[in-house]
Amino acid sequence: MSAQIPDIVKHRVSDKAKATLDIVAKFVDEECIPADPVLDAQIGEGSARWDSHPPIVEELKAKARKLGLWNMFFPKGHYKESPGYTNVEYGLMAEWLGKSRVASEATNCAAPDTGNMEVLAKYGNEAQKAQWLKPLMEGEIRSAFLMTEPDVASSDATNIQLSMKKEGDEWVLNGSKWWSSGAGDPRCKIYVVMGKSDPSNKDPYKQQSVILVPANTKGITIHRMLNVYGYDDAPHGHGHISFDNVRVPASSMVLGEGRGFEIIQGRLGPGRIHHAMRSIGAAERALEWLLTRINDPRKTPFGKQLREHGVVLEWVARSRLEIDAARLVVLNAAVRMDDLGPKAALREIAQAKVLVPQTALAVIDRAVQAYGGAGVSQDTPLASMWAQIRTLRLADGPDEVHLQQMGRNENKRGPAAARKVLAQRQKTEELLRRDGLTLLQPGAHIKARI
């Protein structure tokens, strides 16, 4: 098997990465996708879904490590922990990982651990790295990311209210969080928590801090796991958690008091692009399911196979166009991140974050439509895929926030664009006057002929 690499980035993919990409493709197709239903079966039912860890995951992790497929997400040139792949190279790998529910965790490239590991690698001190980064990189534990809150508009992160108060050599935390991804897993040992440590600071972007909180700390209550369109995402889960006088050592603060926004922006940029990369893979798999359905000789609505209906072939064509276009947007962001770093690629990352989930949802929805009732049931992975990707239009900032920022930045070109258009129009008028002609208004040529 040889994974295809878009010509536009082939020169950016090393021989090592090409070989690894082929291994990833084979591993996902032959090991991970067949194991996805096994994972569901091993999770079980009822409360037991949160009490154990499916053994199939550890089996796949062992296979992945033997194949050298481990922690590929750390980008070369930005982290000493990197196995040596660029964002472009990992992006191509992540597309394959996105085809399977279990593949990302099997290769230790699953959210929220990837983002949390990047936070620790980039901003953590040596003690924090030894205590938390090392076991995360070894796949021995998992983590959760706690930012969103139930009682405020968390799309504006300055609204975050979880209180952090310094008492002696400890920080005392009070408040609540929800959509705490990863909190349901029994192997989740550490929370990366954003809260408000200096509410009186005049700069609203220096009121927040990020702190590391062991999951078994006294005063933490997990109230429930939130469903996503009926899916509980066990054993990973999205927790609704409260903090009641939770005390953690001052040494648990990451980077320093008031540095929360700096840390979170550094975390969310790469996280957004990772989601987009995996979503391309999900869209490709949905297209595979669509092609399988329309070529099924048993399905002959109105006397024809589905592939013989023009509207269905249009679905296929549009899906191919949209996936390929979205992939280029993702790779463009990855190229810029490799060349200039995530901070310089905020526009391109936002473009991918907005466009790609919408594209994937459209493709999945077409496959659902082709399968009819089976498409919305548990008999195909399509309904679950749709639910998971629908959350990405909210996660790491809703579409509207990114679109508003992109629109604001694009509109900065407004005055220059207006001057350019005016100058071009004036030049046109000069040329017309030179030839004794008059600039016609729209529709004037029609009137003249009449």
Image (spheres, helix red, strand yellow):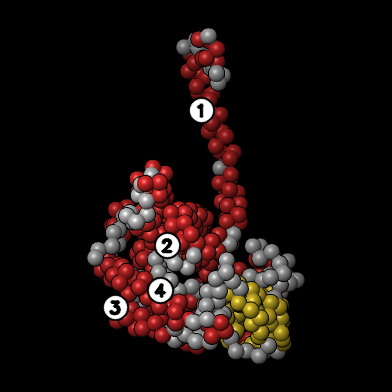
Three-letter amino acid code of the residue under disc 2: Ala
Three-letter amino acid code of the residue under disc 3: Leu
Residue in the picture at 44% in, 67% down: 379
Can you say which quadrant of the picture contains the N terminus? bottom left
Query: On residue 36, which mark appears?
Result: 4
Query: On residue 47, which mark appears?
Result: none
Q: Position of residue 387 (x, y in %)?
A: 52, 64
Query: Mark 2: few, some, or many residues within 10 Å (few <14, many ≥20)?
Result: many
- Check the image and report above or below for 183 versus 450: below
Circles 1 and 4 in contact, beta carbons < 8 Å: no
Q: Nearer the viewer, mark 2 or mark 4?
A: 4
Q: Which of the marked residues, 2 or 4, is nearer the chain's N terminus?
A: 4
Q: Which residue is mark 2?
A: 282
Spatial CA distance of label 3 from label 1 is 60 Å
Query: On residue 424, which mark appears?
Result: 1
Q: Position of residue 27 (x, y in %)?
A: 31, 72
Spatial CA distance of label 1 from label 4 is 59 Å
Closer to the camera in the image, 55 or 338: 55
Closer to the camera in the image, 11 or 44: 44
Q: Nearer the viewer, mark 1 or mark 2?
A: 2
Element on which disc 3 rests: loop
Q: Position of residue 398 (x, y in %)?
A: 59, 59
Q: Position of residue 174 (x, y in %)?
A: 71, 81
